[in-house]
Amino acid sequence: METIPLEKQQTLKEAGEAPAAIFQVQHGHLKLMRHLPDGRSRFIVLYSAGSTFGETAVITKRPIYDHTTIALVPSRVRRLAVTDFWELYARHREISDALCRKFARLVRLQFDRQDLKGTLRLRSRIATMLATLAEQLGSTDEHGDVTFTLPISHTDIADHVEATRQAVQREISALSAAGLIRRKGDRWSVPDLRLLRAAAQ
């Protein structure tokens, strides 16, 4: 695998390009975006250290990528060429087993997301998203807060939860007023993850 350094907001792969590799995040955070017919872009998922992506397009032999992947912060990504992937795939059964488990997990997450969309109000969905990000990316500071740095906008969150930016801004303001989250620029803080999770119920 070769290592690719990325600057903040640099595009790794663009929708419309032919799939030529599979990727793994070594350091940093990247976002997957879908371009909509009306010209807007929708935030789909966040990749952090250890995440692998791009394999679906390769395995299903799509002619082009459907999504664009952009670095949210300075990042490093490992790249495995398609020819090398297929050689390894043929030699190591555990690769297909691992991919099968990953695809099954993604299908389950899609069903879970639809269930959340239908049963939870917007504030609960946002609280769930922020609590999950804090658990995945955060570290505990000297005050006991779980903090993480991520340049994710209200528009990104709105796209992810399928709501308007104004509605998301209102709900995040309410969570902040309740002392459940804090934000200063790209720095997010969660004083008590247990309480934030409780707010998501």
Image (spheres, grey):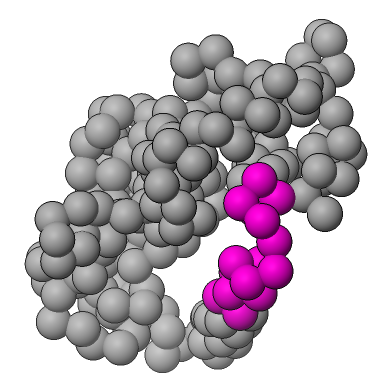
Q: Which residues are magenta?
A: 109-125
Q: Secondary structure of the magenta portion, mostly?
A: helix
- Picture quadrant of residue 194: top right
Q: Residue at x 36, y 28 (%)?
A: 74
Residue 15 vs residue 119: left or right? left
Is residue 147 at all visible to an observer of this figure? no
Q: Nearer the viewer, residue 196 or 76?
A: 196
Residue 142 vs residue 30: left or right? right
Residue 56: image location, x then y, percent = 36, 78
Residue 78: image location, x then y, percent = 37, 50
Q: Residue at x 68, y 23 (%)?
A: 176
Q: Quadrant of the N terminus?
A: bottom left
Q: Residue at x 45, y 52 (%)?
A: 163
Q: Nearer the viewer, residue 97 or 166?
A: 166
Residue 49 on the magenta span? no
Q: With respect to residue 111, does 186 lie above or below?
A: above
- Picture quadrant of residue 20: bottom left
Is residue 130 at all visible to an observer of this figure? yes
Q: Quadrant of the C terminus?
A: bottom right
Residue 104: image location, x then y, percent = 60, 84
Residue 111 on the magenta span? yes
Residue 169 vs residue 148: left or right? left
Residue that protrudes farthest toward the top in the picture: 142
Q: Nearer the viewer, residue 141 or 165?
A: 165
Residue 178: image location, x then y, percent = 77, 24
Q: Residue at x 85, y 17 (%)?
A: 144
Q: With respect to residue 111, does 39 lie above or below?
A: above
Q: With respect to residue 181, does 69 lie above or below?
A: below
- Picture quadrant of residue 66: bottom left
